[in-house]
């Protein structure tokens, strides 16, 4: 029943994304209850030509494990690291930081 509810929630979120024409998509997969965790697929892109970096905020208090970053055009892994908001700003993060850390 929970899986059906999650699929419905996902489908509703997709319909909202289509209306906004967003260039980001987040999919949450609940893992077994004993793990107290979930997996996230976060699909994003940038239209800033020549931009060497793309920053994804890490929610304060969350613990990230088993991260990987993939170029969806080639399927190859990309080098990434977790950086502070100050470091992200020094490398081109625009606007006011909404997180203390970024991938």
Image (cartoon, rainbow, N blue to C red):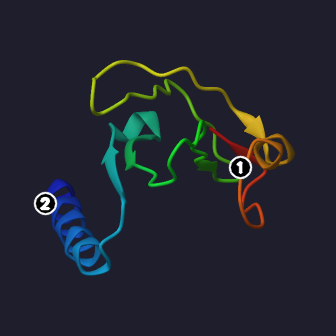
Q: Is residue 73 above or below residue 102?
A: above
- Decide which of tag 2 and tag 1 comes sooner along the chain: 2
Q: Is residue 11 above or below residue 81?
A: below
Of the two numbered discs 2 and 1 in the rendering, the one whose residue sits closer to the viewer? 1
Estimate how packed mark 2 is, as few (under 14), some (14 to 19) or many (20 or more) residues with alpha carbons within 10 Å: few
Number of residue marks: 2
Q: Could you tell me which residue is drawn at 71 percent across and 60 percent down? A: 94
Q: Tag 2, which secondary structure?
A: helix
- Give the image quarter of residue 54: top right
Residue 62: horizontal and vertical position, in percent? Answer: 64, 46
Observer-nearest of 18 and 39: 18
Residue holding disc 1 = 61
Estimate how packed mark 1 is, as few (under 14), some (14 to 19) or many (20 or more) residues with alpha carbons within 10 Å: few
3D distance between C-alphas at marks 2 and 1: 29 Å
Residue 36: horizontal and vertical position, in percent? Answer: 47, 41
Observer-nearest of 43 and 74: 74
Q: Is residue 82 left or right of residue 68?
A: right
Residue 43: horizontal and vertical position, in percent? Answer: 36, 47
Observer-nearest of 94 and 42: 94
Of all residues, the one furthest to the bottom in this rendering is 19
* Numbered circle sitting on residue 4: 2
Q: Could you tell me which residue is drawn at 79 percent across and 50 percent down? A: 100
Q: Tag 1, which secondary structure?
A: loop
Q: Is residue 2 above or below residue 76?
A: below
Q: Could you tell me which residue is drawn at 44 percent across and 34 percent down? A: 35
- Give the image quarter of residue 95: bottom right
Q: Answer yes or no: do the residues labelled 2 and 1 have beta carbons within 8 Å?
A: no
**Quadrant for the N terminus in the image:** bottom left
Residue 73: horizontal and vertical position, in percent? Answer: 27, 32
């Amino acid at each position: 029943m929970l899986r059906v509810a999650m699929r419905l929630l996902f489908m509703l979120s997709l319909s909202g994304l289509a209306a906004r024409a967003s260039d980001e998509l987040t999919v949450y997969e609940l893992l077994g209850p004993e793990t107290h965790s979930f997996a996230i697929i976060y699909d994003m892109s940038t239209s800033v030509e020549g931009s060497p970096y793309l920053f994804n905020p890490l929610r304060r208090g969350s613990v990230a494990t088993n991260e990987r970053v993939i170029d969806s055009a080639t399927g190859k892994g990309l080098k990434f690291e977790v950086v502070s908001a100050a470091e992200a700003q020094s490398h081109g993060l625009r606007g006011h930081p909404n997180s203390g850390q970024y991938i």
